[in-house]
Amino acid sequence: MRKILIVDDSPTIATVFARFLTRAGYQVQTAADGKTGLAMAQRERPELILLDNVLPDTRGTEICRTLKADAELSSIKVLLLTGTHDASLDEAGADLVLTKDCGPARVMAAVNELLEPGTVR
């Protein structure tokens, strides 16, 4: 089963996305802060991380840079979720950046796009 890690300090957002992804057949884990999320990524090696940009202990962009700079973790796809999108977010190395208001259906489409390009679910 394909693994996805959700790193978001909002229990509501994490739960909503986790439910959608679990129903779609993914194995989902969650972390509420950047330090825990990074440790889980190193240990669990998910295929994709849904990463909130504003976390209590760090920025998602910093976690993304750390992941992409690590040869063993750089292949993990990162979907950066943010309240507002500005050009500086694109420089973090995320595979895709979406605003949180796009809704679960768009996030699901993005997950499928990143993990299974060319496949319609």
Image: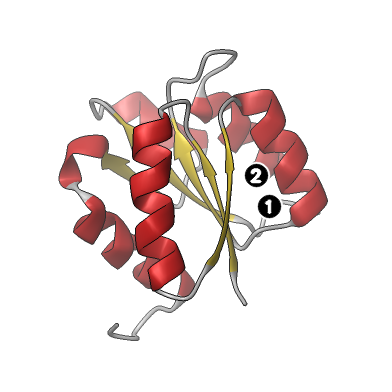
Q: Residue 7 carries which label?
A: none
- What residue is pinned by disc 1? 74
For label 2, count other residues whose C-alpha is less than 10 Å away and answer few (under 14), some (14-19) or many (20+).
some
Tell me the element at label 2: helix
> 76 above or below 102?
below
> 85 above or below 57?
below
Q: Residue at x 33, y 48 (%)?
A: 16
* 81 horizontally vs 120: left or right: right
The x, y position of residue 34, in whole percent, is: 62, 26
> 30 above or below 25?
above
Three-letter amino acid code at disc 1?
A: Ser
> 1 above or below 57?
below
The x, y position of residue 7, in whole percent, is: 53, 37
Q: Marks 1/2: CA distance?
A: 4 Å
Residue 114 in view here: no
Residue 59 in view here: yes
Nearer the observer, 80 or 107: 107
Q: Which of marks 1 and 2 is nearer the N terminus?
A: 2
Q: Which quarter of the figure is the N terminus placed in?
A: bottom right
Q: Could you tell me if the residues under marks 1 and 2 are in contact, i.e. CB atoms within 8 Å?
A: yes
Three-letter amino acid code at disc 2?
A: Lys
Q: Quadrant of residue 54?
A: top left
Nearer the observer, 100 or 14: 14
- What residue is pinned by disc 2? 68
Q: Which residue is drawn at 47% across and 76% down?
A: 25
**What color scheme is it?**
secondary structure
Q: Which residue is drawn at 37% across and 51% down?
A: 17
Q: In which quarter of the image is residue 24?
A: bottom left
Q: In which quarter of the image is residue 117?
A: bottom left
Q: Residue at x 40, y 28 (%)?
A: 10
